[in-house]
Image (cartoon, rainbow, N blue to C red):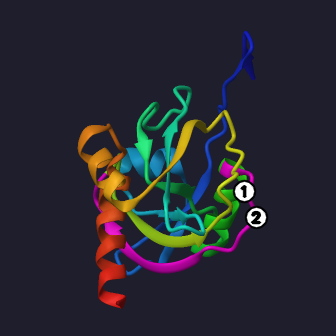
């Protein structure tokens, strides 16, 4: 469907509703899962370049969820039958135009955002010459950890960005 030159997506994605232990309860629309506050899965990836900088992007204004906000992670809902890793790889291809297999670091019950969800946090080293989809990404840049720390205080970020990134840093710290 299109309105003028803009495309409007009216298809709702199907997701697996899960319980607190991440066991599948059934298949529902993501819209319904959010509206009802049902747990479902979301996969995100912290993208680093070969120098250790972190990819930050601003979401397109035309997106239905958190338009125009910045993000530290790239990702989206895990589709029916997908693993967290498969969903993360698919989202990287859709949003950044890259094919890479991210590494799942951890999952947790995330209560920030539009509704509670199981969040799978991944990490991937990606080329610094990504080609983001203009439908998804309005701007992107590479920041060092100190620069990102300042940006998190000054810019408007999605709730998942704050929660996922603080847990990501704690995970990395515990590994070293």
Q: Is residue 64 visible?
A: yes
Would you name the residue on which mark 2 appears? 99
State the image coordinates of residue 12 (x, y, percent, origin top left).
61, 42
Q: Residues within 10 Å of mark 2 (few under 14, many from 20)?
A: few
Residue 118 is left or right of residue 81, and the answer is left
Q: Is residue 23 above or below residue 70?
A: below
**Cβ–Cβ under 8 Å for marks 1 and 2:** yes
State the image coordinates of residue 53 (x, y, percent, origin top left).
49, 61
Residue 69 is left or right of residue 6, and the answer is left
Q: Is residue 83 visible?
A: no
Does dot 2 land on a helix, a strand or a loop? loop
Please report the bounds of the magenta region as a residue range: 96-112
Q: Residue at x 32, y 37 (%)?
A: 156
Q: Give the distance between the C-alpha atoms of the residues marked 1 and 2, in whole angstroms.
A: 6 Å
Quarter of the image for the C terminus: give it: bottom left
Q: Residue at x 55, y 67 (%)?
A: 51
């Amino acid at each position: 469907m299109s309105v003028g030159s803009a495309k409007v997506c009216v298809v709702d994605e199907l997701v697996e509703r899960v319980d607190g232990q991440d066991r599948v309860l059934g298949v529902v629309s993501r819209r319904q899962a959010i509206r009802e506050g049902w747990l479902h899965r979301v996969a995100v990836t912290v993208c680093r370049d070969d120098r250790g900088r972190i990819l930050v992007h601003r979401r397109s204004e035309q997106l239905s969820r958190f338009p125009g906000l910045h993000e530290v992670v790239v990702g989206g809902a895990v589709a029916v039958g997908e693993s967290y890793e498969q969903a993360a790889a698919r989202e990287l291809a859709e949003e950044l135009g890259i094919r890479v297999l991210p590494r799942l670091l951890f999952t947790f019950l995330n209560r920030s955002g539009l509704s509670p969800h199981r969040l799978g946090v991944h990490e991937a080293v990606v080329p610094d010459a990504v080609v983001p989809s203009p439908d998804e990404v309005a701007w992107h840049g590479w920041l060092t950890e100190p620069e990102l720390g300042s940006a998190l205080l000054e810019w408007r970020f999605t709730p998942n960005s704050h929660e996922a990134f603080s847990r990501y840093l704690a995970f990395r710290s515990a590994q070293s």
